[in-house]
Amino acid sequence: MSTETRINDRIRVPEVRLVGPNGEQVGIVRIEDALRLAQEADLDLVEVAPTARPPVCKLMDFGKFKYESAQKARESRRNQVLTVIKEQKLRPKIDSHDYETKKRNVVRFLEHGNKVKVTIMFRGREQSRPELGFRLLKRLAEDVQDLGFVESSAKQDGRNMIMVLAPHKNLKPKPKSTSANPDDEAGAEVAVELPIEAPADNVAQD
């Protein structure tokens, strides 16, 4: 939060350390002289370090300063990278065709710079065979190791087993495109976490 305060005619202290409009050090001057210099230059006297002794003030166009600060803040938010988590669901006894489809989804998600939550769904007696899930997740992690790494190792969560993959940091994300094959999106969910405000998750079933 900015601490700059325009003081102009509000005399707070007998003297201030004055900085010129181009950053030059003027030195310690009486507050009356600082205000006079600001008026002569048609600028504002802005307190930039109120806790210093004496306080530091700068001659500047305060309105322009606030506008430029707001512009920089907007640009920073625009360039902020969102944390996006995709989910891909698999069954422990998945056939080879379905596995390739699911793997293709994971590959695309990682190529786009997204994390992937891989969920193995157990049903009935499958829950007594957790090794099937571990083997499948290990296989998938090895198949996509050129694009991503295991950020969160496989762990049991009720009837599901979950592993999180993250793209390598040096991987340049590919631009997103509309998939022509609806099967590629089967079982994929999206969760977007906003990094600036309080996190908000939007989950959509494709």
Image (spheres, rainbow, N blue to C red):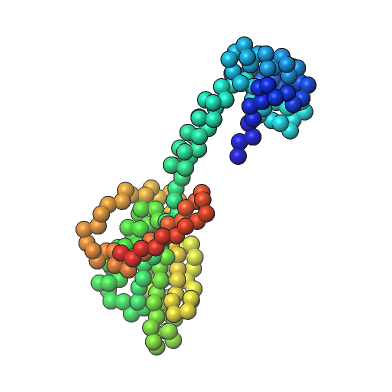
Q: Is residue 84 visible?
A: yes
Q: Quadrant of residue 45?
A: top right
**Residue 183 horizontal/vertical position (percent):** 24, 66
Where is residue 191 drawn, in percent x and y? 41, 60
- Residue depicted at 43% across the width and 42% down the height: 78
Q: Residue at x 47, y 42 (%)?
A: 77
Q: Which image quarter is the C terminus in?
A: bottom left
Instruction: Report the residue that reaches farthest toward the top.
Output: 40
Residue 67 image position (x, y, % from top left)? 50, 30
Estimate the x, y position of residue 117 in percent, counting from the top left.
42, 65
Compared to 205, does 114 lie above or below? above
Residue 28, by quadrant, is: top right
> Which of these two is toward me, 33 or 10?
10
- Residue ID at (66%, 22%): 8
Examine the rendered structure and indicate whether residue 132 appears above or below residue 104. Answer: below
* Quarter the N terminus occupies: top right
Q: Which residue of the protein is positioned furthest toward the bottom in this rendering?
A: 125
Q: Nearer the viewer, residue 12 or 139?
A: 12
In the picture shown, does residue 154 fall above or below 68?
Answer: below
Q: Nearer the viewer, residue 52 or 153?
A: 52
* Front-lying residue, 146 or 173: 173
Q: Please identify the quarter of the rendering in which residue 54 is found.
A: top right
Left or right of 157, for residue 87: left
Residue shown at the point (49%, 73%) measured from the top left: 155
Residue 85 visible, this orientation: no
